[in-house]
Amino acid sequence: MSIKDDKVKYVARLARLKLTDQEVSLIARQLDGILGYVDKLNERLDISKDVPPMSHPHAASNPFREDKARPSAPSEAVLSNAPQKKGDFFKVPRIIEE
Amino acid sequence: MDNLYSLTANELLALMDKRSVRPEDIIESVCSRAQSVDGKVKGYLSIDREGALARAAAAGSRAAQGKLRGIPVAIKDNICIEGELTTCASKILRGFRPPYNATVIEKLKAEGAVVLGRANMDEFAFGSSCENSSYFPTLNPWDTSRIPGGSSGGSAAVVAADEAVMALGSDTGGSIRQPAALCGVVGMKPTYGRVSRYGLIAFASSLDQIGPLTKDVRDSALLLGVIAGYDEKDSTSVNIPVPDYLSCLTGDIRGMKIGIPKEYFVDGMDKEVDAAVKEAIALLKGKGAQVSEVSLPHTEYAVAVYYILATAEASSNLARFDGVQFGHRCEDPQNILDMYERTRGEGFGAEAKRRIILGTYVLSSGYYDAYYLKAQKVRALIKDDFDRVFKAGLDCILTPTSPTPAFRVGERSSDPLSMYLSDIFTISVNLAGVPAISVPCGFTKSGLPIGMQLIGDFFREGKILRAAHAYECYTDWHKRSPIL
C-alpha cells in the first residue's frame, strides 16, 4: 500500500498537526517504508477469526474506589502552567462565531 | 577507599551504617564527578546540586531511616516532580512544572532517596538513540562518538559514567533495557502493572512501565522493591504483594530452568554479541542451570505489531498537547483550529510527528481492521508464545538485549525503520507484559559493552533477579567503568 502526500495531509488534519510541504513528502516517503514492513502481518500471517484482540496484558476489570468526596488539586496549581488564563479558567481563542 | 561516586547504593548504605560516610559526602562526590564528565556525556538536562545537598543533609539528620537514605537518583525527564521542570525533552512541554509528584517520586522520597537531576531522553520516549531529544543528544560514556541507546539514554549514561548512583527510566519497547545494554549497566522493565505509572507522561499506555537502571543487580532489586506496589491512582497497577527482592539473590543458578529461543539468534546479528551471549549461556550451564532450546514462533512479527499499537496509542495520548492547559502555544492564533495545528506543528519534533501521523493513519476509518485490529490479534499470539513456555516450567528466557553494540551518532537517524529494528529483541516483552532485565555480559574488541536479557513470567521479577545476580557473581563485567 503506497501512501501519497494528500493522504498524509488528510491524516495531519485529523491529528490537528500542521506540517510543511517538505515534512509532508518526507513523512509520506518514510511511511511507505514502515507500512511496507508492517504489511508482513497481512501477507505472511493467517489469523483465524477466533483469536481475540489483545488490548492490555491483564484481564480487564474496572477498579472502583469508594464513592466519597475528597479535595482535588487547588485550581491555582492546575492553572499555573496555562499559556493564557482568565480568572479561574484557561483562555483560548473564540470558539463560537458571533 | 574508592571514590564514593563509583560505589553502588548497597555499598554506600553499608558505609553510612558504619557512620564513616555522610549523605552530603555522597552528593558532593557524585556532583563533582558529574561536573567533570557531563560535558562529554551530556546525560543530564539539569542537576540540582544545592537542592540535593539540602535534602541529603535532611536525610542524614533523620538518622538511619529509609531503604535509600541519602542515595542520589537521576530521574528521566518524563516522570513528574512537583514544581520541577518536566519536559519529556520536548519543546512542546518547555517550562512545564507539574503540580504533583509521580507516585514513584513519593516512594523514593519516603525512603530517603535524593533526586539529583533530570536525565535526557528521546522526545516523549520516541527513539532508541537519545538523538531525538529536542535539547541535545546524550553520548555513550564508553565511546562518545556513539549513541547511548534510548529512549532512557540519559538515565543509562549517567549511571555508567558514575554521575548518579541509580536512575529511573521508562520502557515501552526496550527503552530501559537497550540503553542499559549499550552503556554496560543493569536495566529492568518490571511486569506491566508492577509499578505505578501515576505521574509518568504517557507514551503507549498498554506498554509503558517505569523501572530501575543501576550499577549491579543487587541495586536493581533494592530500587525495584522501593518503587513497586499497587497504587489506587493507577488503575492498571496490580494489587498483589511485593516480595523482598533482595532475599531472592541466592548467588547461585543451580537447578534454574533457562530457555533459549532460537528466533533470537538471527542472521545479521553482530558476531561479537552472538559470541558473548553464547558464552554466557555456556557459563550458566556449567554452573548447574538446566538450559534448553525453546521456540517463540511469532517473534518476527513483534516489531510490526509494536509500531502499529505503540503509535496508535501515542497519537491518542499526545492529543493533550494542544496549547490549552500547559506548555507551548503558538503566537497570535487566528482561531482554535489554527491554535491546535500550529502549536503542535511548532512544538513536536520530527519523530513525534512521524509517529502521530502513523498512529492516526492506522486508527483511521478504512485502515483500522487491516492494521490496528490485526496487530492486536497478533499481540495475543505473541503473549501466548510466552505463556506456553513458562507453563512448561521455565524459570527464565535468555536472549541478547540488542542485536548490535552502540552504533555511531547519526548512523540510523535518517532511516526510521533501521532505528525501529534496534529494538527487535526487547519489544515482545512489552507486548506480552512480562518482566525482563538486561545485564552486562561482555565487551567487543573495541571496548563497547554487550548486554544479555533475562525474561521472566508475570510478576516473577524475583526469578530473573536471582539468575542475573548469579551470573554477576560468576563474572565481573559489571565492575568495569568507562574512562572519561
Image: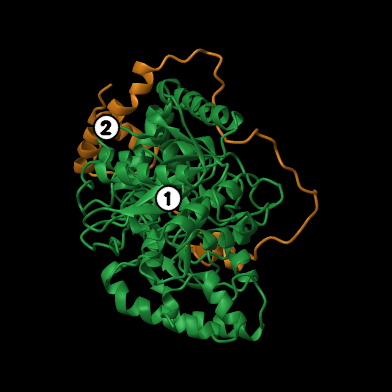
Chain colours: A orange, B green
Locate the N terminus of chain B and report the quarter of the image it occupies.
bottom left
Local secondary structure at mark 1: helix
Subunit bearing disc 1:
B
Q: Which residue is mark 1?
A: B177
Left or right of residue B201: residue B149: left
Q: Which residue is mark 2?
A: B267
Quadrant assignment, res B481: bottom left
Q: Amino acid at mark 2?
A: Asp
Subunit bearing disc 2:
B
Q: Residue at x 19, y 42 (%)?
A: A22
User: Closest to the observer: B296 or B206?
Assistant: B296
Q: Position of residue B173 (x, y in %)?
A: 43, 43
Q: Residue at x 76, y 59 (%)?
A: A70
Q: Is residue B323 above or below residue B428?
A: below
Q: Amino acid at mark 1?
A: Arg
Would residue B142 be seen by someone viewing this image from the given angle? yes
Q: Say the numbered circle drawn on residue A56.
A: none
Q: Residue at x 71, y 47 (%)?
A: B240
